[in-house]
């Protein structure tokens, strides 16, 4: 069987795109599943990502409906707002609200947890994962439609990316939940992404490269801090001049 080089390049590009755009999704899933009992966290990650994969494939198969979401519905402050814009704006507001509550809970400590913590159920976590995955995947799905003409190429890219995320999500979740400073940094990332989504909804496009570079640089600095804290400093023994050797 002969493979067109352009199709292979499109497939590899889409897989990479889905993985990169899925990083923020993994961070959000890590924070959500961290609310569940340890015995349920892995099941929630696998279930959420698997259902998210099905959702993305259904979006790809609903090309006509998906393209209708880009048609303007009304105008706000001179900006045309489409169905896609509404979904993205609502997703950004949800991320801002969720991240702010989580940060408030961390800063308030145990007293804040008693006053503001809402018990998370398995079904509730899965529902939130699915809703946010739709928001996170809209851009990547629309981009995939523009980059590839074959539906099997787009579906294959989604499946490969989600499989990769399934293997990666457990390690990322464990790392985020075991390091409070990293979790706070992750919540700050989600705040940034929320603001970006709202801006995108109002046609204020922020280059993704700037955002991902800022996130990568902040994470690099945090890794240096963790490494520095992990070093064991050997105490210096001082000789007491009153004690003769």
Image: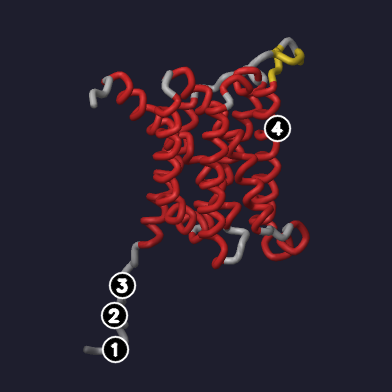
Please indicate whether residue 50 sits to the left or right of residue 82 in the image: left
Vertical comparison of 141 with 39: above or below = above
Label located before the other in sequence (2 or 4): 4
Sequence-wise first label, 1 or 4: 4
Q: In the rendering, at what x and y percent does residue 174 appear?
A: 47, 59
- Asked whether residue 114 appears in the rendered view, the answer is yes
Q: Earlier in the sequence, mark 3 or mark 1?
A: 3
Tell me whether circle 2 and circle 1 mark residues in contact (CB < 8 Å).
yes
Q: Check residue 239 in the rendering and tell me which mark sits there, or answer none.
A: 2
- Give the side of residue 195 with respect to residue 230, left or right: right
Q: Residues within 10 Å of mark 4 (few under 14, many from 20)?
A: some
**Residue at the far bottom in the pictured view:** 244
Is mark 2 in CB contact (under 8 Å) with mark 3?
no
Secondary structure of the residue carrying numbered label 4: helix
- The residue carrying pointer 3 sits among few (fewer than 14), some (14 to 19) or many (20 or more) residues within 10 Å by Cα, namely few
Q: Kindly report which numbered mark, 2 or 3, lies closer to the viewer in this rendering.
A: 3
Residue found farthest to the front? 1
Determine whether label 2 and label 4 are within 8 Å by CB: no
Residue 84 image point, x, y percent:
65, 24
Q: Is residue 185 visible?
A: no
Q: In 3D space, how far apart are the residues under numbered discs 4 and 3 (Cα atoms)?
A: 57 Å
Q: Nearer the viewer, mark 2 or mark 4?
A: 4
Q: CA distance from mark 3 to mark 1?
A: 17 Å
Q: Give the alpha-carbon distance from disc 2 to disc 1, as whole Å.
A: 8 Å
Q: Which residue is mark 4?
A: 90
In front of the other: 234 or 181: 181
Q: Nearer the viewer, mark 4 or mark 3?
A: 4
For disc 1, the marked residue is: 243
């Amino acid at each position: 069987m002969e493979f067109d080089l352009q199709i292979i390049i499109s497939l590899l590009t889409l897989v990479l795109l889905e993985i990169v755009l899925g990083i923020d999704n993994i961070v959000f899933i890590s924070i959500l599943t961290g609310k569940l009992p340890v015995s349920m966290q892995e099941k929630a990650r696998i279930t959420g990502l698997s259902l998210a994969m099905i959702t993305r494939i259904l979006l790809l198969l609903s090309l006509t409906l998906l393209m209708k979401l880009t048609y303007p519905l009304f105008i706000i402050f001179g900006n045309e707002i489409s169905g896609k814009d509404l979904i993205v704006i609502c997703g950004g507001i949800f991320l801002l609200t969720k991240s702010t509550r989580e940060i408030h809970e961390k800063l308030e400590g145990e007293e804040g947890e008693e006053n503001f913590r809402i018990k998370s159920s398995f079904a509730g976590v899965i529902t939130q994962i699915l809703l946010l995955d739709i928001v996170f995947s809209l851009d990547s799905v629309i981009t995939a439609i523009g980059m590839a003409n074959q539906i099997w190429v787009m579906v294959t890219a989604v499946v490969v990316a989600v499989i990769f995320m399934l293997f990666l999500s457990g390690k990322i979740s464990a790392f985020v939940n075991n390091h409070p400073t990293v979790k706070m940094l992750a919540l700050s990332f989600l705040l940034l992404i929320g603001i970006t989504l709202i801006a995108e909804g109002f046609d204020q496009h922020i280059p993704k490269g700037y955002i991902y570079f800022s996130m990568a640089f902040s994470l690099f600095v945090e890794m240096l801090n963790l490494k520095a804290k992990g070093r064991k400093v050997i105490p210096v023994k001082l000789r007491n001049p009153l004690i003769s050797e």
